[in-house]
Amino acid sequence: MELILKEDIDNLGFKDEVVVVKNGYGRNFLIPTGKAVLATDSAKKVLAENLKQQTKKNQKLIKEAEKLGNDILKIDLKISSKVGEGDKLFGSISSKNLSDALSKEGKVLDKKYIIIPGRNIKRLGKYEATLRLHRDVVPRESYGENDAHQSTTSAALAYKGDGFSLGAEYNLQENAKNVLDQERTGISAYGSYNLNDGMSLFARYDELSSESDWNLSEDGTFMIIGVEKQMVKGLKVALNYQSSTAATENAEAESSLFMNLEFKF
């Protein structure tokens, strides 16, 4: 399911970022705790307008983040740890250890913006940590002529007829996470049909995919089909079926049935 984050979430994204998560994680945790809201068409429009108004401020923050990224890539960090039998470490190395090491070098970066695969390093080996300095800035191994600024191109079509509506969206993110030529695309199709007595049918399909499967853990499809009934003025009840399928090999669909109530005062 697609959500808009209301605050920074470790290993997921920044405030006001649109992310795709599994249904259970979104419905049972992120939404109930107020950490995210559904990325509906209206919510996306409001978000786009808010981000547009913050453009100048964001440009300044991006420049500061890029400078920090450049500075960090020039630092040779050393974190010592005792090793037991084989390649197993005594204890582990975490994002907090990296954050503390950077602080000693005069570069402050909260541990929640440092992502280590598996969250901790427990064995000898080569590992890669991702630093999230800004929603549009992720430091790479080198900067210069291959600098890549993330950009998103969107297109949408909508049609409203007598008792029904149809719509579709296409999004292309180039240089995703500031990695040159790394792309991901998202498509959405949705529609509704009005029945008698204030009842309507609705459906939506979303698909997120990445070129060369670099974002396979987040790629996949999401589908929702339901019926909505206007009970009285200001009160709607909706029964809907939701299904999501990850893009990973042999992934099985996760399906759920929901009943939603909408009050307007």
Image (spheres, helix red, strand yellow):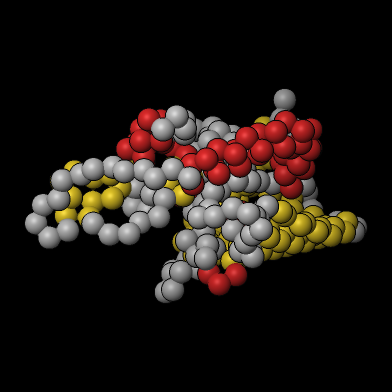
Image quadrant in which you'd find residue 104: top left
- Identity of the residue drawn at 63% across and 54% down: 144
In this view, the residue farthest toward the right is 162
Residue 94 on image: x %, y %: 31, 42
Left or right, 154 with respect to 91, comes to right
Residue placed most toward the observer, 96 or 52: 96
- Residue 65 position, x and y percent, is 60, 38
- Residue at horizontal 68 percent and vertical 52 percent from the top: 149
Residue 176, relative to residue 81: is it above or below? below
Give me the residue at 51% from left, 59% from top.
218
The percent position of residue 190, horizontal first and vertical second, equals 73, 59
- Please tell me which residue is depicted at 42% across the width and 46% down the height of the picture: 115
> From this viewpoint, which residue is outermost toward the left?
85
Report if residue 260 is visible in the image: no
| Location of the C terminus (image quadrant) | top right
Q: Position of residue 102 (x, y in %)?
A: 41, 35
- In this figure, what is the number of numbered marks? 0
Q: Is 29 placed above or below 142 here?
A: above
Q: Nearer the viewer, residue 211 or 193?
A: 211
34 with respect to 38 (left or right): left
Question: Residue 217, can we see it?
Answer: yes
Residue 109 vertical position relative to residue 175 in the rendered view, above or below: above
